[in-house]
Image (spheres, rainbow, N blue to C red):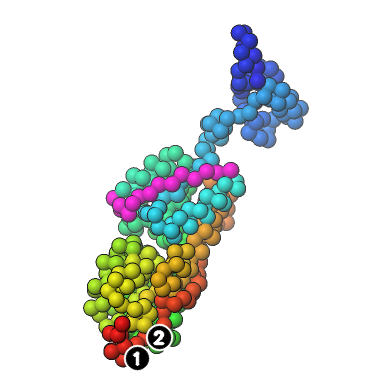
Amino acid sequence: MTVDRAGRASRATITTVARHVGVSVATVSRVMNGHPTVAPELIERVRAAAAELGYTASPTARSLVLGRTHTVAVVVPDLGNPFFQGILRGVARAADVEGYHVLVADTAEDVAAEPDKALRARGRCDAVVLVSPRLADDRLRDLLPDLGPAVVVNRRAPDGIVPSLHPDYRAGMAVLADHLADLGHRRLLYLAGPAGTFSDRERRAGLADVARARGLDLTVLPGGVTQDDGARAATAVLATDATAVLAFNDLVAMGLLARLREHGVVVPREVSVVGFDGIDLGAAAAPPLTTVRVPAEEIGAAAWRRLARLIDGDDAGDDPAAAQSFRPELVVRSSSAPPPTSPTDKEAS
């Protein structure tokens, strides 16, 4: 601290330090920000003066000097979804270790709002993690160059123009279908997610692979992404002869379970229900939900590592088109069991 002419204490500034040492403000700035071109003797003098005067560079001033905010944006379609919360947590914890903060933008599943929200977030940050963008490939391809540095999570970036990280949805859904087939189910029903999205297309492909290989009957009905979507689908599900339902995600499965219970349908005795994502709430469902666990926090941390290299310009040798995938893990609980042995078994309560 310094003292002004009226005897009042005032905060030391970079100008105060520069005058004290007899150098330019730019020189003090270079010293405080670790610039390697300053002579060691001068570094010692500037740091000694800063310590004597109680000067520390403010984050705002440092950002102006470095051209960085040390903040990254994470843009998600629904912050209420525990899966996206897990990705956000992974990014935030990994970024915090390196002194970065996270700004969150929630597009509320509004596809039309995605570009504007992502661009406004990028204007306040050094880079963007774009999670599960719902935009069509051509629109996303046009947007990504304006967001860079950027990585895409839960989807492949068009033409590999930025790094992308995603669960292996195809393999995960195939594991679930094989699990049900091993139990003896031959009539499966898939409650689909958002039409045309990468994650829904991959889930469908995994189901189709198993259905072909094992001679299963597969029905697809519109589902959604929320518990309400799952509840609304219950009547349509009961109108089919499916003995097992694969929901787009755990939230949809949990909504379906709750509504089936209201209808007096006993799960899994009359119909099995499985989810996808492995959120913690699934273990507390009634009955506890069979699912595949996606390592959301691990994906978020890996997204930060890719993004940090882009921010620092240390991405030599990286192939942006090389998407990184993460294989889900089957978690068997009591919502799946062998199918009814006869039609009357399925109708019994």
- For the residue marked with disc 1, what is the amino acid? Thr
- Distance from Cα at disc 2 to Cα at disc 1: 8 Å
Furthest-right residue in this view: 41
Furthest-bottom residue in this view: 342
Residue 215 coordinates in the image, percent (x, y)? 35, 87
Relative to residue 133, is residue 347 drawn left or right? left
On screen, residue 79 above or below 208: above
Which residue occupies the foreground of this view, 291 or 118?
291
Residue 35, located in which quarter of the rendered image?
top right
Which residue occupies the foreground of this view, 112 or 298?
298
On screen, residue 121 above or below 210: above
Which residue occupies the foreground of this view, 200 or 332?
332
Q: Which mark, by number, is residue 338?
A: 2
Asked whether 103 falls inside the magenta stretch, the response is: yes
On screen, residue 50 above or below 174: above
Looking at the rendering, the stretch of residues picked out in magenta corresponds to 99-112
